Image (cartoon, helix red, strand yellow):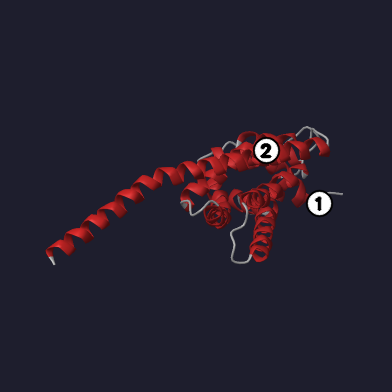
Amino acid sequence: MIDTKDRILDAAEALFARQGVAATSLRSVTAEAGVNGAAIHYHFGSKTALVQALIERRVAPINDERLARLAELEAAAGAAPVAVEALLRAFLSPMVRRGSEGGRPGEPRLAGLFAWLHGDDDSHAAAIRARFDAVKRRFAKALARATGGSDAALAGEWLDAAMGAALPLLAAVRAQRARDVDDRFERLVAFLVGAVEAASARERRRRAPARGRASGAARRAARGAGGRA
C-alpha cells in the first residue's frame, strides 16, 4: 500500500509533468492525491520543499547512475579518452531506463517532467537544471576530450541536443515493448554518435584556418626579428 507521502509525490509528479510547477497549486496536488490539505503541509511544509523532495526522488538517482558509469568508463580508459558512443550511452541510458518508473501505462510521467524541466523558466525548473548542470559539465569535459579537444561549452550543447532527442523515446518507454525501445535506443545512439563526430569535425575545420594564420604570423615575426638582428 502506498503511504501518504508517496501518494503526494506521485500526484505532484503527474501534475508537474502535465502543466509545470508554476501552474500547479498545492490544493490541486492534494485533490489529485486524494488526501486532505494538512497532509501536504505535514510531510513537506511548502511547495518548494515538495519540489525538492521530487528532485531527490527522480533526479538524484539518474545523476548518481550517470556519474558511476562515467567513473567506470574513465577508469577503464586510463590515460586515453572515453569513446563518444560510450559517453552518450552512459549519459542517456539511466534516464531512458528509468522512464518506465512511476505513472500508469500510457502516462509518460518522467518524459513530461523532463520536457517541463528543459522548457520552463520558473525558479523550480532552474533549481532542478542546476542539479543536472554539474553532471552535464563532467560529461561535457569528457566529450570534449573524446572529440579531439572540442570546446567544453560546445560539448555541453551537444549533450543538451542528445537529451532533447531522447525525450520522445522516454515518452514511448511505457507504451512499447522493451525490445522495441531497445531497438529505438540503439538507433538513436548511432545517430547521435554520427552527429557529434560530424559536428566536432566541422569545429576542427573551423579552427584550423585560425591556427594557420596564427602560426604564419609567428613565423613572419620571427623572420622579421632575425633580419633586424
How far apart are the two marked residues, 1 and 2, measured between alpha carbons? Answer: 38 Å
Please tell me which residue is depicted at 21% across the width and 58% down the height of the picture: 221
Label 1 crowd bin: few (<14), some (14–19), many (20+), radius 10 Å: few
Q: On the image, numbered disc 1 is attached to which residue?
A: 3
Residue 100 position, x and y percent, is 77, 42
Of 93 and 64, nearer the camera is: 93
Chain-order first, disc 1 or disc 2 = 1
Is residue 30 visible in the rendered image? The answer is no
Position of residue 194 relative to residue 137, above or below, is above
Q: Nearer the viewer, residue 182 or 51?
A: 182
Q: Amino acid at mark 1?
A: Asp
SS at circle 2: helix
Answer whether labels 1 and 2 touch (C-beta < 8 Å): no
**Position of residue 105 measured from the top left corner of the image (x, y, whole percent):** 81, 35
Residue 208 rendering spot, x and y as whole percentages: 39, 47
Q: Residue 48 vs residue 121: left or right?
A: right
User: Residue drawn at (77%, 46%), measured in percent from left and top?
Assistant: 7
Number of numbered tags placed on the structure image: 2
Name, please, the residue furthest toward the right.
1
Residue of label 2: 188
- Which amino acid type is shown beneath numbered disc 2? Leu
Determine which quarter of the picture holds residue 27.
top right
Quadrant position of the C terminus in the picture: bottom left
Closer to us: 204 or 228: 228
**Residue plotted at (54% across, 44% down):** 158
Q: Which mark is residue 90?
A: none
Q: Position of residue 10 (x, y in %)?
A: 74, 44
